[in-house]
Image (cartoon, helix red, strand yellow):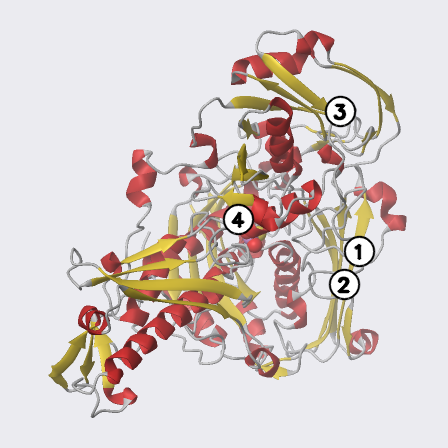
Amino acid sequence: MSSNIPNTSTSNNAATSVGKPNTRVDGPLKVTGAARYSSDIEVEGVAHAVIVQSTIANGRIAAIDTSAAESAPGVLGILTHLNAPKLNKLSSKKTVEDSEPLDPALLQSDKVFYAGQHIAVVIADTLERAEHAAILVRIEYNEQPHTTDIYESLTEAFAPKDVNSKPPDYKRGDTEAGLADSDVTLDEQYTTPTETNNPMAPFATLAVWSEENGEERLTLYDSTQGVNNVLKAVTGWLGLKQEQVRVVSHFVGGGFGAGIRAWAHTTLAALAALHVNRPVKLVLTREQMFTSVGHRPATLQRIRLGAKRDGRLTAIEHHGTSPASQFSQFEENLTASPRILYSCPNVRTTYRLVRINTNTPTFMRAPGESTGMFAFESAIDELAYKLNIDPLELRLRNYSERDEEQDLPFSSKSLLECYQLGAQQFGWSRRIHQPRSMRDGQYLIGYGMASTTYSCYRMPTQARARVFRDASSHQGVRVVVQCATADIGPGTYTVMRQIAADALGLSVDSVRFQLGDTRLPKSPVQGASQTVQSVGSAVHEACTKARCYLLELARKKENSPLNSHLDAEIGWGDGRFFVNGDAMKSQAYAAILKQNNLDGVETELTSQAGDEQKKFSMQAFGAHFVEVRVDEAIGRLHVARMVGAFGIGRVINPRTAQSQIFGGMVWGVGQALLEETHMDDAFGRYVNPNLGEYHVAVNADIKSMEAYFVDERDEHVNPLGVKGCGEIGIIGVAAAIANAVFHATGKRIRDLPITPDKLI
Ligand code: MOS
């Protein structure tokens, strides 16, 4: 694997950390096992909880016999809907934070809506005894007919209301007129299957109750992408005050969206601990991970395109339908990308949901965009063949200079540079347009490409920075920066130190960054590629404010060497201020603090976007190029090369950014070729809820992978000039691979994953 790593340095201070490929500060902790994940945390007297799940997909629990389980060795208690405490409903306005107003998996009634719904929790003194007793719980059901097949209920599809994502229906111009006015049209259907997030570490909760000043306290060590989301849901359901509950999540073994919402098992762990009056640890099994923490919903999509002979698009329609559970409405940006990706006067998109008997779907790795862009960028490729125009050339002919959905200029857009750089590094010019025209011995060779784009999100975020004197530091001071964000793997611990170090003119070893605790300043979830944009901006602003405060303190003293100079003439680095061009005139932070009889200074603030979000459309863009090799005799396909080029604003850390993008591209290979959660419609149960039969891409599936970042300056997007760098890596990959498969074989695969049976 290789990449070009631009050194995107920043600001006029002396020590620049931003732009350097620092290694992960949490790396040694993780490889030595010193990092404590929620399931690793040890407390005195801990008991273990095991969840019993429904085996039917619809109906009621007629009877539960727990007598055998209760008398099994080591059992401390069993919770079912018959004895579980009654919980509060959350506010009826559905937000991500609210999760389900009242999740049926919280043991509040005898109703069963899907197979795998939690219906009992068995608590014992050891995990093995809890597992044994869980088998002894006898359940009788009144089973009702269920449906897990989205096609069965298509006529009952509905438009989601009160949506979190972009509105489900969108229209500009008149697509029927645009289609009538075109020379070439296309109308095709595409499908993608249910996929399961499958982070490496199964989610776990350790619940510890205590008492403080006569009031109950609950501490939850949880696997989550957002401790504040868990706090909100748990306090809501349990009817506790915010200050009674603390949620801690210092390390998480992946999430990929599964940890954005608060799920029922976390609250069940708290109820179990209350029930047996001991700390309780609850770890979901891999099989339970398929039914307890969401999944990517399947999609049915229809794309209609119209174009002039020269390739100019006259109409785009994108219609998408996905399943929802019986009791909740998860929705995603399935049909959002075609509204802005290319220039087109007539665009219409619709999005519908169909209720079936499954657990509620959730966010997964570019939720909506990655599946939506599979369909859309496949359709654009199909159009290229109908027009006999090179697929990259067709995209250039439809390049959009503005966001035509919002009718706004982009804050920055480097897609042209991405196309150019990606094509050049890949060798796109060697491509012969005719399908089945490139071959190497037994292999048919295909070149395919696709665009990618993802919105820039910035949510209000709080951060605190404390600069304090410390003689043991070579810079005389140290800094602790705090924010309740998460680091599920992208390198947040690392890049926040770099951002803080530069804002304060310190080296990264003088900076500590603390996260993953609701006692810290409030943060949005680590999701939607928004962490560096939101948390990074807050860290930058809090540290900048601390630096300005230190300068103010210095200026209070008449003898300061800085006083005869304007702020603009003063630089900062190595723990001191200095006059630009005259390094002899300088003053160390430690000396300033000492002069003012202070141990340190502290700042805390809320950072949020201003008007710029109304003036500009903010999107990251990129392009994927892939080469596939297909052995047609046995339907075997491998992705031989992948090249991606991306405009993601300033790159804080090229190493962790590249790693994020590689991760996305690998997931794209999984989505294109491997990942599929199979449903047995007769029983309404998943058939492959394990990593033996649910296949993710592994090292052996990846041959050569390159990721490039174009040098992109964005002065509007946020104070750091950064765009998101998570989901953009996966979006478009499945289409690029499917397009390469068509180029190699002449077979257009419109249903993911592209398995060998579809190629023979
Ligand atoms: Mo991501 S699916 O926003 O964790």
Q: Earlier in the sequence, mark 4 or mark 1?
A: 4
Image height check: is 70 above or below 661?
Answer: above
Q: Earlier in the sequence, mark 3 or mark 2?
A: 3
Answer left or right for 330 relative to 151: left
Of helix, strand and loop, which one carries label 3?
Answer: loop
Residue that label 3 marks: 83
Which one is closest to the eye, mark 3 or mark 2?
Answer: 3
Report crowding for label 4: few under 14, some 14 to 19, many 20 or more residues within 10 A (C-alpha).
many
Q: Which amino acid does label 3 sit on?
A: Asn
Residue 124: horizontal and vertical position, in percent? 58, 16
> Which tag, 4 or 2, sits closer to the chain's start?
2
| Residue 13: image location, x then y, percent | 25, 76
Q: Residue tagged by mark 1?
A: 352
Helix, strand or loop at mark 4: loop
Q: For the residue marked with disc 1, what is the amino acid?
A: Arg
Asked which secondary structure carries label 1, the reply is: strand
Q: Earlier in the sequence, mark 3 or mark 4?
A: 3
Disc 2, disc 1: CB below 8 Å? yes
Q: Where is residue 26 in the image (x, y as percent from the top left)?
A: 33, 46
